Image (cartoon, rainbow, N blue to C red):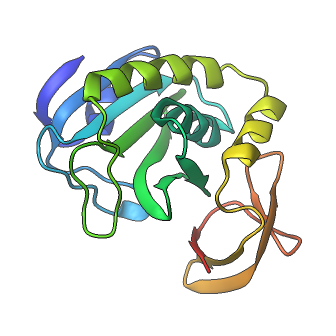
Amino acid sequence: MRLGSVTSTQDVARELPVGSIVIADHQTAGRGRLERRWDAPAGTALLVSFVLTPNPLLSLAAGVAAAEACGPPVMLKWPNDLLLGDRKLGGILVETTQGKAICGVGINLSWAPDGAAQLNQPRDEVFEKVREKIAVWTSAPPERILARWRELSASLGRRVRVDVSGRATEGVAEDIGPAGELIVDGHPFVAGSITHL
């Protein structure tokens, strides 16, 4: 389903069956994780939501899919950011509701906010690649998803600060656990936002 302007592709997709895809030119109330706003001028970003079967590793699988679709040198920052260099290129937002998972992908194409990156590739081409890669990675075995995520990670092996509910922990991001949790100095984090130090 291709739309012009929507509040959010996530909002439209929530009402649709598994297998549906919603792509829009513009979002008036786009959002990322932790209720952060996602703004982009009309036609400058890939804004798409996929209605999928829930999967505990869906956010990581979608990140792998989007990074591969964008091509090297795009890397992943735990839990759901796409990086080009050290700058944010896009992100993944997974919301689960009524037995379905709504997986939103946002990628800056021809415009980016201050400090962020842009891909400078045609939207339809990037969308087709993302759609193909989402199909591949959302049906991949968990160990394959985790292995590929590790290969594409910009977070592992670095000192990071993890912020969870106002509490910050610093340490080395050592690995990703079987449920997608980030292991920092031996401690698993299932949620939070990280800063590369």
Count up the numbered dots.
Answer: 0
Question: Is 188 on the left or on the right of 23, as rendered?
Answer: right
- Relative depth, front residue between 42 and 181: 42
**Front-most of residues 154 and 19:** 154
Whether residue 7 sits left or right of residue 55 in the image: it is: left
Q: Is residue 140 visible?
A: yes
Point 73% across, 37% down: residue = 148
Provide residue 34's location: percent of width, then percent of height: 43, 63
Can residue 138 be seen in this snapshot? no
- Residue 71 % position (x, y): 51, 35
Q: Position of residue 12 (x, y in %)?
A: 26, 30
**Outermost residue toward the right?**
186
The quarter in which the C terminus is drawn is bottom right
Residue 130 to residue 177: above or below:
above
Front residue (pair 98, 120)? 120
Where 195 sits versus 151, above or below? below
- For image coordinates 33% across by 22% down, the residue present is 125
Q: Quadrant of residue 190?
A: bottom right
The N terminus: image quadrant: top left
